[in-house]
Image (cartoon, grey):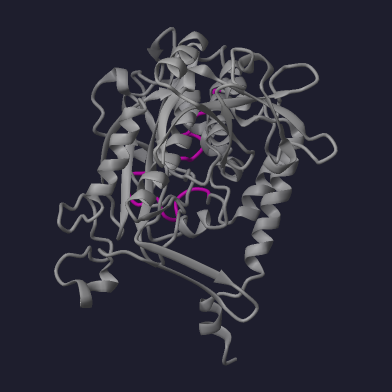
Amino acid sequence: MTIDEVMKTIQDEGITQVDLKTTDIWGRWHHVTLANTYFSEKTFVEGVGFDASNLGYANVVSSDLLMVPDPSTAFIEDLDGQKLLSMICDVYNVDNGKYSPLDPRTILRSAISSISDVAENAMLAPEYEFHIFNSAKFQISHNQVSYEVDAEEGFWNSNSKGEYFIDKKGGYEQVPPFDTMAKVRGAIVDELLKLGVPVKYHHHEVGTCQVEIELSFAEALRAADYAMLVKYVARNVAKKMGYVVSFMPKPLYDEAGNGMHVHQYLVKNGVNIFTGEALFGLSNMALSYIAGILTHGKSIMAFTNPSTNSYRRLTPGFEAPTSAVFGLGNRTAAIRIPAYVKDPAQRRIEFRTIDAMTNPYLGFAAMVLAGVDGIRRNLDPVSLGYGPIEESAEGKGEMLATSLREACQALVEDHAYLTVFPQPLIDNWVEKKTKEDLQVARVPSAEEFKLYFDL
């Protein structure tokens, strides 16, 4: 929508309140709701002030920033019977009325502008994997550390549920009645389609109560907006239906984890520049892009896999990649070249390491900048030893980061390619994520009791 269309929609639809959503540094939405009598065309210029210290942007001494709505993101939502017009906001400085350099949306927008010598945009198509539980609860206290999730189709309920449950790691594209998530997944997709999100397909995934929704290609900034919207819609629709959703990479022990594989290619003059006559039908530019991502693989992960739980998914023995390699149709590689793509206009690569804990604006920006750095340096993934790998990639090539702390240390040592990332943001990110790693390490686990209690 344009500004005029937003104002007309508010009037025509009888909207009484306008909801403004903005993304904090870490990747969570926050919102403020304005009465329509307080909202006007001036809001698109003057914005709405907020305390940025609570969103990771600034300290309490200099914490005033502005959220300015982007009219092109407008959508109507029904929030428990209340009709709202919602918009995603950019963050502006109050002193000069310009984008805040710490704003994640601004960083991604700047990243795309900075690669104009190579491409005009990056086209991204993420796959969203997540779990839908009937219940989830957790507790940490001095004498008790526990969590429990449950799902009606869980194989652990076979003694009480009879035939209709998903066996361990046996859920891939199951059909009803075994696929008990079909109805809620379909309701999530229906809502996304109403909001204009380009859903490609959805299905049950390998794990118990694990599902996937895949989107069609969109320009990078819009793809990141969709990532925020997918999480928001999935959680709200599931809640209404009596379920709870988690995008955690590894919520269940010894079951398939949740990635957020991102299919991608670059566009120049409206043409896919990853198409060529080099290896696997890719261009030399695409191969250099692969080399850039793998060369910076560990430091990228501080943004693309920014939780301690991310590294419980990235363990040997599963499809999740643990080595900086690429291959044709190889789901154990960090970068897979989809073998089923025959149309040259759709030629692409798939980055499989990333998960949904990422702030999509920062994760996508880091990924694209790393790839373009490889193009500018004319890196060759084959001569660098990144593949191609035809067999299992486990144990092949250089290991990716195995912990959040290792990824953060790599970011400290390797971030020159993140040309539009302000140094204060990188410093703040490393500090907070290192503290998270230490915080999790301080909590005893049940496995430690099993291993060490009787020593």
Residue 388, compared with residue 251, is above or below; it is above
Q: Residue at x 62, y 64 (%)?
A: 440
Which residue of the protein is positioned furthest toward the bottom in this rendering?
454
Bounds of the magenta segment: 378-398
Asked if residue 448 can be seen in this view, the reply is yes
Q: Give percent across and percent down for residue 179.
A: 20, 55
Residue 250 in the figure: left or right of residue 378: left
Identify the image quadrant of residue 326: top left
What is the tally of numbered marks visible in this picture?
Answer: 0
Residue 52 in the figure: left or right of residue 161: right
Q: Give percent across and percent down for residue 69.
A: 58, 22
Q: Give percent across and percent down for residue 175.
A: 15, 52
Q: For the N terminus, give its image quadrant.
A: top left
Identify the image quadrant of residue 57: top right
Q: Give percent across and percent down for residue 157.
A: 26, 72
Q: Which residue is drawn at 78% across and 35% down?
A: 63
Residue 291, compared with residue 71, is above or below; it is below
Q: Residue at x 75, y 34 (%)?
A: 423
Q: For the C terminus, give its image quadrant.
A: bottom right
Magenta span: chief secondary structure: loop
- In the image, 69 versus 200, the foreground residue is 69
- In the image, 302 versus 44, the foreground residue is 44
- In the image, 229 versus 357, the foreground residue is 229
- In the image, 164 versus 137, the foreground residue is 137
Asked if residue 388 can be seen in this view, the reply is no
Q: Which residue is drawn at 36% across and 28% down?
A: 195
Q: Was residue 392 drawn as part of the magenta stretch in this picture?
A: yes
